[in-house]
Amino acid sequence: MSTRTDSGEHDPIIESRDQLIAAFAKGEKPKDRWRIGTEHEKFVYSRKDHHAPSYEEKGGIHTLLIGLTRYGWNPVFEGENIIALSGADGTISLEPAGQLELSGAPLDNLHQTCAETGRHLEQVKYVGDMLGLGFLGLGMWPDKTRAELPIMPKGRYEIMLRHMPRVGSLGLDMMLRTCTIQTNLDYGSEADMAQKFRVSLALQPLATALFANSPFTEGKPNGFLSYRSHIWSDTDPKRTGMLPFVFEDGFGYERYADYALDVPMYFVFRDGKYIDASGLSFRDFLDGKLSVLPGEKPTEKDWEDHLSTAFPEVRLKSFLEMRGADGGPWGRICALPALWVGLLYDQGALDAAWDLVKDWSMEDRQVLRDSVPRLGLDAPVGKGRTLRDIARPALDIARSGLAARGRLNAAGDNETGYLSALEDVVSSGKTHAERLLDRYHGEWGGDVSKVYAEESF
């Protein structure tokens, strides 16, 4: 989740609807300036006893952040607490229970993206070794209860933790017990954004299946392959979901702005502090009628903050965020941007991907989204087909799209090799979650703690 560090007192006040729409239009870029941003989270644990370290404890999260400054990362403060780090490779931030996230820099190609990921993981492993900390690549804590997890000292999280139980039964699990990999991608125009949004939203369940990696809860199988994805189904219905309007004629920036205006607020950031505005209306804020800031109108930065509090399967800011994948091991981090860049950044591939999904009804898309957390590749796609029938052609399209980009590394290799982890899933027919379940019922003898030895970075 985003980290706010300034109050934006010099930021323009929103005086018209055009400024809301401009937040999306400013993301338009010519194709040669399209970039790739990759975000990945991992669980931090003590190697001694597998507990999740608190921010304050000796050798805990604060100490980890301090340790990473040896690599040139600059501390970002909220009050007196370091809550993030900034540097050439983007931003390192904390999720609510201490999950460590890298929000990578916008990069030209996947070779750079994977190198960035490698640098980051090598850095955290080195500092972690000094502190006795390990890092786990899964979509959900396999053994921790909510009560066993610490809370990081970030003001927006205090507000969200209070609000989540009012609107869903699993929102606290989303905040405290999950990790994801995300990819952020550019668009060239409003029409290009709309096509990419439709294709990626329809195929987001495919990413959920291919990256399914959260089959355990509190030490036992939970009946799902991606329990992390299931959690979103009961987090907050007003800010999650498949957004049927995206597939309607005329969809564009203005329609998404209307959707975002209807998402209830969480907070307003002023004078270095988060003001609780949970459940209030941004429309009232536009009219100067927000009860917690009477007479005050929002700034453009307030709108950007608000956009970050909607959690659909694909999210629009000044770029598109792909949000369907579980966290996972090192090699799979590079595979997610490879999938989406291959599908969305070459026009021929994008058109072919749209041909795959254009005939799906909204009911088809919703049934697929609802069933994929439990069924993975066996989730139904319309009548008589499953995601297994879609996975191979989608991967072939992504491969062709990456080949067409022609981005080569020093050895002369293009970007298609980063799809290898997904090729393994499609060829074998087994998701990573299913492999974990096989080991749990087999060589692990029902002991989920074995996952720490086998799934850590």
Image (cartoon, grey):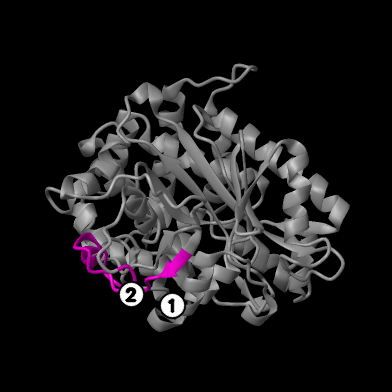
Disc 1 element: helix
| x and y, in percent, of residue 37 in the image | 49, 39
The relative height of residue 165 versus residue 289 in the rendered view (above or below) is below
Task: Give the extent of the magenta segment.
Answer: 274-293
Q: Of callouts 2 and 1, which one flags the residue occurring earlier in the amino acid sequence?
A: 1
Q: Residue at x 42, y 54 (%)?
A: 206
| x and y, in percent, of residue 410 in the image | 63, 17
What mark, if any, has residue 279 been given in the picture? 2
280 drawn magenta? yes
Disc 2 element: loop
Farthest left residue in view:
249
Based on the displayed image, in which of its 4 quarters is residue 350 positioned? top left
The relative height of residue 291 versus residue 43 in the rendered view (above or below) is below
| Spatial separation of the CA atoms under disc 2 and disc 1 | 8 Å
- What is the chief secondary structure element of the magenta stretch? loop
Left or right of 401? Residue 227 is right
* Residue type pointed to by label 1: His
The reply to whether callout 2 and callout 1 are in contact (CB within 8 Å) is yes
Front-lying residue, 150 or 14: 14
Q: Say whether residue 227 is visible.
A: no
Based on the displayed image, in which of its 4 quarters is residue 30 positioned? top left
23 drawn magenta? no
Left or right of 180? Residue 263 is left
| x and y, in percent, of residue 257 in the image | 23, 54
Counting the numbered discs, the total is 2
Residue position for label 1: 163
The relative height of residue 347 versus residue 449 in the rendered view (above or below) is above
* Residue type pointed to by label 2: Gly
Front-lying residue, 112 or 404: 112
Q: Which residue is drawn at 47% across and 35% down?
A: 36
